[in-house]
Image (cartoon, rainbow, N blue to C red):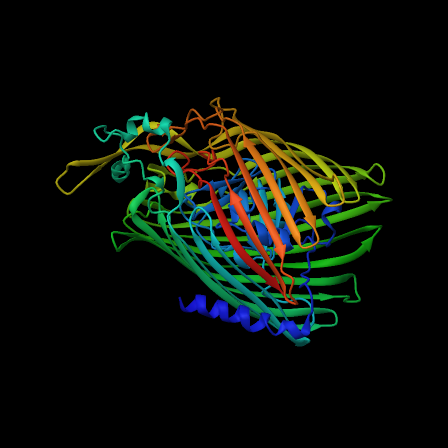
Amino acid sequence: MKLKKITCALFFMFTFPAVAADKGTLTIPTTAVTGNPLGVGSDQMVVPISILNGRELSLKRENTLAETLNSIPGVSNSSFGPSVGRPMIRGMDSDRIKILQNGVNNLDASNLSFDHGVSIDPLIIEQIDVIRGPATLLYGGGAVGGVVNAIDHRIPKEKLQGITGRGEVRYGGANLEQSNAAVVDVGTGNFVMHFDAYNRDAKNLRIPGNAVSDRKSATKFWDPTANTGAGRHEDYSNNNGTNRLINSYSESKGGAIGASMIFDRGYAGMSYAKHQTKYGSPLESAVSIDMDNDRFDFASEIRDLGSFFDRAKFRAAYTDYIHKEIEDGAINTTFKNQGVEGTFELGHQPVLGIKGIVGAQFENGKFQALGAEAFVPSSKTNSQSVYLYEELPIDKHKVTFGLRHGQHDVDSKGGGDFIAANKNFKTNNSAIGGLYTLNSQWSLTGNLSHNERAPSYFELYANGVHAATGMYEQGQANLKIEKSNGLDGQIRWKSGQDSLTFGAYYTKFSNYIGLRSTNDPHETYDENNTLTETHKISQFSGIKAEFKGVELEGKTMLTDYLQFNVRGDYVDAKDKTNGGYVPRISPLKLGAGLKYEFDRFGARLDVLHAFKQDRVATNYNYEGNKELITDAYTNVSMMATYKLPTQLNLEAFTRANNLLNEEIREHASFLKDIAPMGGRSIMFGLRGEF
């Protein structure tokens, strides 16, 4: 409550003085900084990239990062209820997707377990860049599937004289969200300070009908007399609620302070940010999760050095993350993650027309799991990498190429049922791509890459019951490096405000590391030698796999005020070793929309149809059952905006979701059959900039 009052005070304190100043709309730099260190725009990128910023981002902000990005082709939400959502890209998740904050890894535990939220709140993010496809050259071998970079401008990079900022309040939605945020930058020319604060409260999610799907209800897991081996999850055969999703609330708050000195040829600054959130687990009505994240960032850049290396950039972040799982009011398990990560880049002047950068990246992390459900040991991960990225312009065309070499040490302390071990891996990544300009409107891009990813600590050393998945997860210390080769291409058309992009990709893994079910049981006994639980063992192992798909995105102006949008994506992921499919792959999705803007008024209608997903895995069990088919759905949403006729730059908006009140279950979600998306709802909000 105290933080909420501070947020509102900041908003009104700095907004109302703007009446006299009438400085207009706040302009935030929107350069695509992800995927290309040379700072080119998205039209000149070889890899597929989507950028969400400004007013568009403000109106699309949702409870989680993944849900905010649901309109981007190829991106899906591996949700664990409405409070937890980590982006999946092209059917890949976990360590294959890098979540960055201002270009530096966001260190939390969301890659370890699907019930762990991403420690970034979209309320204060100014821009989100999404790379679809391998980004291993610049961001490490783990970024095989893609990169999501959340940019918050907490370290100012431009001179400022005076005060600028923005604020937002909103209420409503299927979870009756009450949220507010304020962002303020104060500058005296060369010295600029940044402040932000936010607060979000959401109730249990309102859903259409029963939480548990008909298919799930028909399985023996939901028969309380059956011995499913799912342990303490059996007591939720009561359907997890009707019309409301039990224990799906969330509370978040946080803020940051940053400062920079701006020079004629660069800047240097640092920031401190805190994020706290508490949310319930729809899987277990007596369980809540309390997350606390402290992060310190430092960034500096110097340009025009007057030598062969004409630019130097350094970024680093220290994170102290703690995550407590509370059951019946007592702390059951604690996860801690502390670490520092950074990059140093030198940009060089053209050599025979070739311009690029050389860089180094380091990561030092310490992970601890303490308590009753610690299924992974305490571990340390140390990585060092060097990389090279170059571009060669040829008339209106361009060729890009790059190399990366990494050394990764993954240590387990052992203890209890865990082994003590030290594993070392060397990874090599390479890529070559090109942009071919056919004429002023049409262009072609292509990218060929070789990608290597070192196994993570949980893939190597896990050995215990993972409550969030109901599996006994078992790592293998002898896992080899995950290797793949990928081919990606796009055809692009752009004419004025109209554009169309169609892309296709193919990635072949010679060793794809995933969790596979076995027929071996693991039995748990109490002190009286009485059998209490039985779980099937699921083991991390490598297989051959193929991922291929297509993506479509376009827009055209039908009139001066009416825009038509279209989007679509499809991914096919096959297990080539055992046959069948890789689990939790999003189905074919097609969407279209109309966007109208005239004077102060704006309106938008969007329709997204997700087809039935019956391409399910056969060697994967979740909660004692094989992956279930997901039915098709159609999501219709609308939005209306109105810029208030005042000297303030204020805009009121209302947004209606799931107007057909359909039962929407995202196939990529671990809880799709017991935690559907929200029902028909409406949200109201007010946003302002100065």
In this rendering, would 430 be left or right of 95? right
Return the x and y of residue 395 as percentages of the image width and height.
87, 44
Numbered disc total? 0
User: Please, which residue is most extreme toward the bottom here?
Assistant: 188
Q: Is residue 257 above or below residue 614?
A: below
User: Please, which residue is most extreme toward the top here?
Assistant: 579
Return the x and y of residue 195 as percentages of the image width and height.
55, 69
User: Please, which residue is most extreme toward the front here?
Assistant: 645
Which residue is rendered at x = 70% and y = 71% of the image?
A: 159
Q: Which of 287 and 529 is in front in this view?
A: 287
Which residue is rendered at x = 27% and y = 30% of the image?
A: 228
Q: Nearer the viewer, residue 679 or 482?
A: 679
Q: Quadrant of the N terminus?
A: bottom left
Residue 34 visible in the displayed image:
no
Return the x and y of residue 75 as percentages of the image width and height.
56, 40
Q: Nearer the viewer, residue 199 or 51?
A: 199
User: Please, which residue is most extreme toward the right here?
Assistant: 395
Return the x and y of residue 244 as percentages of the image width and height.
36, 42
Q: Quadrant of the C terminus?
A: bottom right
Q: Is residue 116 above or below residue 186?
A: above
In this rendering, would 310 be left or right of 671? right
Residue 607 visible in the displayed image:
yes
Locate residue 25: give its quadrant: bottom right
